[in-house]
Amino acid sequence: MNWFKRMAIYLFVILLLMSIYNDLTKGTPLKSKDFFAEDEVVTPKEIGVVKIQAHHGDTILTLSEKLEQTRTGKINMKDIITDFKTLNPDADPYKLDPGAYYYFPLNKFDSQ
């Protein structure tokens, strides 16, 4: 009986180490259908965007405030920067070029 317990423990440890090695090297494959089934991919055409020309001294916040003149409430800067980066992948959100056009989402500025 002692020999059987010892072999069972050795077998368990070997299988555990093999499993850990497999996870670290290959990982667990994810099916793309299952992974993205819960998230909806929204394109800029579906959410509505507005194209705004930046002027000297404009920031993302000032342009966002121009869009949300009729809305009362707080502006979440993290959301605005994330949306800006999504719609303008080549632009630096912290340094807008005067005269350049940038896209902003309209759905973020609807009244709540």
Image: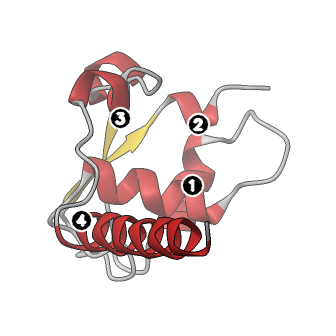
- The residue to which callout 1 is attached is 79
Instruction: Nearest to the eye among marks 2 and 1: give it.
Output: 1
Q: Residue beneath label 3, please?
A: 50
The mark lying in front, picked from 3 and 4, is 4
Q: Amino acid at mark 1?
A: Asp
Q: In screen coordinates, is 70 left or right of 101? A: right
Q: CA distance from mark 2 to mark 3?
A: 11 Å
Tell me, yes or no, whether the two marked residues, 2 and 1, touch with CB atoms within 8 Å.
yes
Upstream in the sequence, badge 1 or badge 4? 4
Q: Circle 3 — which element?
A: strand
Q: Secondary structure at mark 4?
A: helix
Query: N-terminal of the two: label 2 or label 1?
Result: 1
> In 3D space, how far apart are the residues under numbered discs 1 and 4 (Cα atoms)?
38 Å
The percent coordinates of residue 61 (x first, y second) are: 57, 65
Q: Which residue is mark 2?
A: 108
| Residue appearing at x 40%, y 23% in the figure | 40
Q: Identify the residue under disc 4.
A: 22
Disc 2 and disc 4: Cα gap in Å?
Answer: 44 Å
